[in-house]
Amino acid sequence: MIAASTLLREIGSDFYTGVPDSLLRSFYDEIVRTYGLDPAHHVIAANEGNAVGIAAGYHLATGKVPVIYLQNSGIGNTINPLASLMNPKVYGIPCILIVGWRGEPGVHDEPQHAYQGEVTCRLLEDMGIEYSVIGQETSQEAVRDEMHRFRELLSRGEDVAFVIRKGAISGDRESYGNSYTITREDAIRRILAASGDDPIICTTGKAGRELYELREKDGAGHGRDFLSVGSMGHASSIALGVALKKPESTVWCIDGDGAVLMHMGAMAVIGKAHPGNLLHILLNNESHESVGGLPTAADAVNLTEVAKACGYAGSASVKNDEELERELSGIRRQQMPYLLEIRCSTASRSDLGRPKESPAENKKAFMSALGGR
């Protein structure tokens, strides 16, 4: 196991950008300890492609090599800018990728990471990116040797990557939070009471796990809920597709701030399509809480005004129990699409479980409840 401080020192960069991953928690906590959230040195991106663009700009302005951290599920978001911007056949802009290897073959993980784990190294190879795997047995000397090899490639405008196995990096943890009092789980409990038998599409992360456990506790079954265990940022697009083909149903989308920011263009598409049966519920705790709590840019964005500018029929934001109760009690009377932002704390239960059914079983039950095939 290598210390996060040692890895940063051997890499030797003074600029980091990316999207958090739980496997890289110690790494980005060390970045925060070293640089804080000073955007001159550390930018938490909306998505991984955004991070590549930021990194390219840093190199153009300084001539130095930036570092991009990401979960392997975010490789897809990087492919276009890595291939059409950074590649030596285009501009030859060097960067170092730090990739958390979720779903590594032979290592237990969640089902949404299984295929991504299989193809992680293959995708890097297909893009011509030299990589080195860091595991619990990797020494500081080994990292130093790889960086010596990488620096020659970087000097030629090539990109390189460290692929990080589970448990490979150690370090002290930083704590993150906000001052909001509504817990996400309590907000979801109230949403379920208001939604009745309506279909719900839920974003990835802890929100889906909390939704699942609340249904379990109530003995209500799970056929009404589609849990988007992967594809971060796409729950609202899934909800739009359902809403357009099920106009007789009110469709609820439970979303998160990190997910909304990751693919915020979806809100413009929802506004343009203007489904009169879509309720977009944004649980905003201003953090990537499911992967460690690093802040998002949501504290600097008025997402209710963004929704209106995108063409939503209306929007509102609530910060306490009374406001939430009032909004949910009358939400069905609102013109839709409608965005309700609920400002939430970053708190969650330490004993939070995971769905027992497979994603394929969830899909089948959801489609059956919708009257699909």
Image (tube, helix red, strand yellow):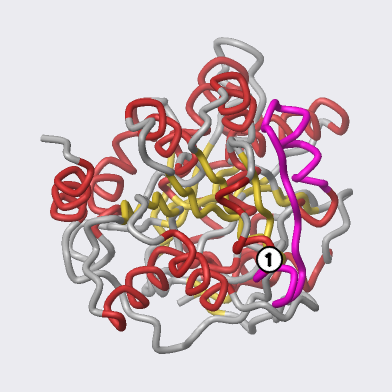
Q: Position of residue 257 (x, y in %)?
A: 64, 53
The residue sitting at the left extreme is 373
Q: Position of residue 209 (x, y in %)?
A: 38, 70
Left or right, 14 with reference to 367: right
**Residue to which mark 1 is pinned:** 285
Left or right, 154 with reference to 115: right
The residue at the point 16 percent across, 52 percent down is: 365
With respect to residue 371, does 325 lie above or below? below
Q: Position of residue 45 (x, y in %)?
A: 69, 45
Residue stretch rendered in magenta on the structure: 301-325
With respect to residue 330, does 156 lie above or below? above
* Foreground of the two, 273 or 78: 273
Left or right, 162 with reference to 116: right
Circle 1: element type: loop
The residue at the point 36 percent across, 35 percent down is: 248
* Foreground of the two, 47 or 192: 192
The kind of residue tagged 1 is Asn
